[in-house]
Amino acid sequence: MNSPGCQQANCSETLKEGMGLTPEGRRESRVCTVRVPINIALVKYWGKRDQTQNIPLNDSLSLTINSLHARTTLRVNYEIGTDSVKINGKSQTVTGSRYQRVFEEVRRWERKRKAGEVAEHPVSIQFEITSETNFPVSAGLASSAAGFAAIAECLQKIFGFTDSQKSQLARLGSGSAIRSIFGGLVRWRRGTQPNYEDSIAESFPSTHWPSLRALILVVDEGRKEYSSTDGMQRTVETSTLLERRIECCDVNIDKICAAFSNRDFSAMADMIMRDSNNFHAVCMDTSPPLMYLNDVSRTIIRLVHVYNEKNGSTVIAYTFDAGPNATLYLEEDTVQDFLDFATKQLRFAESAQTEVEEILGHKLDESVNNGALAQILQVIYSQVGGGPQLLSLH
């Protein structure tokens, strides 16, 4: 028979295991890896009424793009140490950054939760993040949204946070990240309550429109001249058109949602393009103007309208976030004809031409305009509506 002391020791070891503690009484590290798609706004938010909490001036609406994503691993160590973040192999500054804001909020919640527990297990948490993206960062393709949504997703899995807390963490990192924590068509409500608890994301069923596709034409892989954060603040301070845009956003969202529910592509596409044009008009009304579009962007806009006129109805839509790269929405049965048309009108880099051939399933003819002065650097074809995926948790 074991002595009472041995029984007590065994119970203590069992208790430590149940609490996720090492034999020495330390909490074991937790590691989570997720893959989260970007989202592209169909109705953009531009401007904040609370910059610290990332609370927008207007509602926004987006679709996730399945093929473009951040693959993020978060390690939580229960010890005193220095937080670290590495994006695409490059170390990021944490002190004073959006990452630190998210980390400190988690520590605050954990201190509050453990306030009544024994002092021998203080809240010492160190975060290590490694993230890889398969798309250009800071070129207007919502890289920060996917990244911070992935961080929030990992934090929820490790700490057991609610969906509301996950939304808050994603939003603290990047406002539009709140729209990547769900799949499908997602509306981010600006909220009206003083504590912002109703500034949340709402999702449509991700399988509602299975034939809908996105084509992304990358025309510039470089970092944009003005970040979204800096740009929207300048707009708030100087634009005379912003107030009118805010008044129209809710109506435009309702129209797009109704068209989406009815699978009325033409009606939805017209509103998506109108919002994109209105958004960039507001950017140009900013002083000095925010010129996110370039000559190739404007060529694509003209090309889409010519193609729609050729078809006698609106069968393709464009939208541009705060950058020159175009996101085009169309149905699956339109893809081949449009690409055959576009490759005769635009100059494609050799690698982009290969991507088009893979989408089409055949070689392009010799009349394709490609060469050293390529306008289209990359072509991305994707289904839409996917959500976060848990890859591992231990």
Image (cartoon, helix red, strand yellow):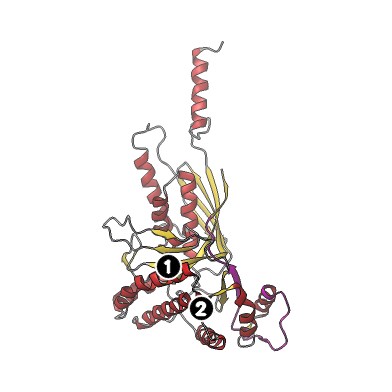
Q: Which mark is residue 317?
A: 2
The quadrant in which the N terminus is found is: top right
User: What residue is drawn where x is 48% and y is 52%?
Assistant: 153
First in sequence: mark 2 vs mark 1 = 1
Above or below 329: residue 17? above
Residue ID for mark 1: 61
The quadrant in which the C terminus is found is: top right
Q: Dominant secondary structure of the magenta stretch?
A: loop
Q: Is residue 120 left or right of residue 311?
A: left
Q: Which residue sits furthest top?
A: 1
Q: Is residue 211 left or right of residue 46?
A: right
Residue 97 visible in the picture: no
Kind of residue at badge 2 = Ala
Q: How far apart in space, not on screen, are marks 2 and 1 (Cα)?
A: 15 Å
State which quadrant residue 270 falls in: bottom left
Kind of residue at badge 1 = Leu
Q: Secondary structure at mark 2?
A: strand
Q: Is residue 94 left or right of residue 308?
A: left
Q: Secondary structure at mark 1?
A: strand
The segment highlighted magenta reads 359-388
Identify which residue, 82 or 240, lies in the foreground: 240
Instruction: Please tell me whether residue 383 belongs to the stretch shown in magenta.
Output: yes
User: What residue is drawn where x is 36% and y is 46%?
Assistant: 108
Residue 243 visible in the picture: yes
Q: Which residue sits furthest left?
A: 194
User: What residue is drawn where x is 27% and y is 58%?
Assistant: 193
Total marks drawn?
2
